[in-house]
Image (spheres, grey):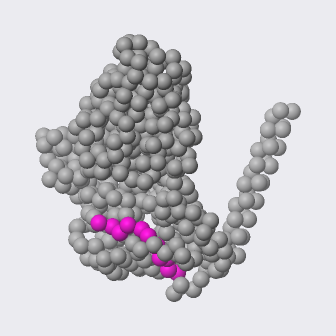
């Protein structure tokens, strides 16, 4: 009887899914697109791109534009998730170390082929020390990449080769399921030669139409392999905001009251991002070298106190791994007041004074002010907030010349490890000065684990250790809100990588 009920439930579920699919298809077909000449989108109040080199572009604006000019092995799709682009087929060897990609045909705006050798040349240039790319580390798991980075081998020894024009082979130093996900990042876009923005030879869905001091325009690239799937004819990005009119698309400024916009013609879309902001102690500096003190601070932290100071799309979190779809393994437990009392007795002090580094920024000022009030609920604790310009603040953290900081992290690739490597003992980005043999062992164990979900489970254990020892105290996940003219659809919003994807965007009649 139970088996029969299960079968009936499964059949009903399948029917419901089929119904929703058909309904969605019929709904899509019933909507009418505006004429071709009106398939245009203007984005207001957006930063303009600054770096046309895909291997050096670190600002979101440049990465977003480049992701629309080029198409690589993988891409961010209409729903923001990673999907194959020029990869027609992927095969892994039995031992999991060799990836063989069969490529689709692609040509540039000048009619030149993007083939397997294009990617070989690109990957070799990416790891070349002369390139000095901040993204070369993304290939650290490829054969010979580390040796090349240390100057011990030449770039042409990298574990990547063209079997023929349409077959690319990549060899890893260890099996790693899911490695291909990082290949969607902008650093891997096939750029034959770096030129000025309006001279770039590209193979993506759009090409540069014009660029000025406050405006950049993209036009549909008719040589793109899926040009028939691209509906927008023109994308124009302007640095000046235009929230007074119900037109186009634009990011919502911090603390802007969205109730003032024209609700008839505009809609608001809140988009989570991979960035996470947290309190970061320097565990070598007293009193933060005391685990009990850090735990008392972490347990006192009340994230609800700062909710009103967050931007619309930002949300409080107790996780460091904010992109993780599964629950955290453990949370910090204990009594903050009791822990703080033990610290004061150990130090033979009734009062403890600490400095909190913060940004010269309206949002950061509001947050740090509320954090100060919140943390000073610990009897005898005084928190002095020090605001610094971003550059100076970063220099202090990197040099270790700080004790406590309101900090943040924006991962460079869509894997859980992107949040955790900065806490390894010998990592150059370890400004927390955290050193733990057990943590390093977990990270090594994860790297030697092929299956993605098993590897992620180990990363969750590593996160739990950081949270339990209060090495990092997460506060909120980054996010961005957009005001969009009604009628535009199929805009992708990746959590990591480009800010948005307009390749398959369309404008419909309202």
Residue at 25% over, 47% down: 392
**What main secondary structure does the magenta stretch of the protein show?**
loop
Quadrant of residue 69 in the image? bottom left
- Residue 150 in the figure: left or right of residue 407: left
Residue 78 in magenta stretch: no
- Quarter holding the N terminus is top right
Residue at 39% over, 72% down: 239
Above or below, 437 against 202 in this view is: above
Residue at 13% over, 40% down: 152
Image: magenta residue range = 39-50
Depth check: give the residue in front, 459 or 360: 360
Q: Is residue 321 visible?
A: no
x and y percent of residue 264 in the render?
Answer: 66, 74
- Residue 454 in the figure: left or right of residue 35: left
Residue at 37% over, 64% down: 61
x and y percent of residue 110 in the render?
Answer: 29, 78
x and y percent of residue 307 in the render?
Answer: 55, 46
- Quarter holding the C terminus is bottom right
Quadrant of residue 148 in the image? top left
x and y percent of residue 178 in the render?
Answer: 43, 44
Above or below, 207 against 291 in this view is: below
Above or below, 47 against 508 in this view is: above
Q: Is residue 151 visible?
A: yes
Above or below, 330 against 395 in this view is: above
């Amino acid at each position: 009887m139970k088996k029969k009920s299960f079968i009936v439930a499964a059949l009903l579920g399948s029917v419901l899914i089929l119904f929703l699919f058909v309904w969605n298809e019929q709904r899509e077909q019933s909507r009418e697109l505006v004429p071709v000449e009106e398939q245009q989108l203007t984005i207001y109040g957006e930063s303009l791109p600054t770096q046309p080199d895909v291997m050096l572009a670190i600002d979101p604006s440049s990465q977003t534009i480049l992701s629309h000019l080029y198409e690589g092995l993988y891409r961010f799709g209409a729903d923001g998730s990673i999907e194959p682009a020029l990869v027609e087929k992927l095969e892994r060897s039995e031992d999991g170390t060799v990836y063989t990609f069969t490529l689709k045909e692609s040509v540039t705006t000048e009619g030149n082929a993007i083939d397997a050798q294009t990617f070989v040349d690109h990957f070799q240039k990416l790891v070349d020390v002369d390139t000095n790319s901040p993204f070369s580390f993304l290939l650290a798991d490829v054969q010979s990449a580390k040796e090349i980075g240390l100057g011990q081998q030449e770039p042409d020894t990298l574990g990547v080769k063209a079997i023929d024009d349409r077959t690319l082979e990549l060899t890893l130093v260890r099996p790693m399921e899911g490695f291909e996900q990082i290949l969607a990042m902008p650093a891997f876009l096939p750029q034959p030669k770096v030129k000025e923005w309006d001279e770039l030879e590209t193979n993506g869905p759009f090409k540069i139409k014009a660029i000025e001091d406050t405006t950049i325009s993209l036009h549909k690239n008719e040589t793109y392999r899926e040009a028939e799937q691209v509906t927008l004819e023109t994308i124009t990005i302007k640095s000046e905001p235009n929230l007074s009119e119900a037109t186009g698309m634009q990011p919502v400024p911090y603390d802007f009251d969205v109730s003032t916009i024209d609700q008839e013609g505009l809609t608001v879309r809140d988009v989570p991002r991979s960035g996470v902001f947290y309190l970061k102690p320097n565990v070598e500096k007293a009193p933060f070298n005391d685990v009990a003190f850090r735990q008392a601070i972490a347990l006192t932290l009340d994230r609800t106190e700062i909710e009103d100071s967050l931007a619309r799309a930002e949300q409080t979190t107790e996780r460091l791994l904010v992109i993780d779809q599964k629950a955290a393994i453990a949370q910090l437990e204990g009594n903050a007041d009791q822990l703080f009392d033990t610290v004061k007795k150990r130090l033979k002090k009734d009062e403890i004074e600490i400095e909190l580094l913060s940004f010269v920024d309206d949002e950061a000022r509001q947050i740090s002010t509320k954090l100060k009030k919140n943390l000073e609920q610990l009897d005898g604790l005084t928190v002095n907030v020090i605001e610094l310009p971003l550059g100076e603040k970063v220099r202090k953290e990197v040099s270790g010349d700080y004790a406590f900081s309101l900090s943040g992290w924006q991962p460079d690739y869509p894997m859980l490890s992107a949040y955790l490597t900065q806490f390894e003992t010998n990592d150059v980005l370890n400004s927390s000065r955290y050193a733990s043999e057990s943590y390093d062992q977990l990270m090594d164990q994860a790297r030697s684990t092929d299956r993605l979900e098993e590897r992620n489970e180990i990363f969750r254990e590593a996160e739990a250790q950081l949270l339990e020892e209060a090495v990092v105290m997460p506060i909120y996940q980054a996010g961005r809100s957009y005001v969009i003219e009604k009628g535009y659809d199929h805009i992708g919003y990746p959590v990591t990588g480009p800010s948005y994807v307009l390749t398959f965007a369309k404008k419909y009649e309202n």
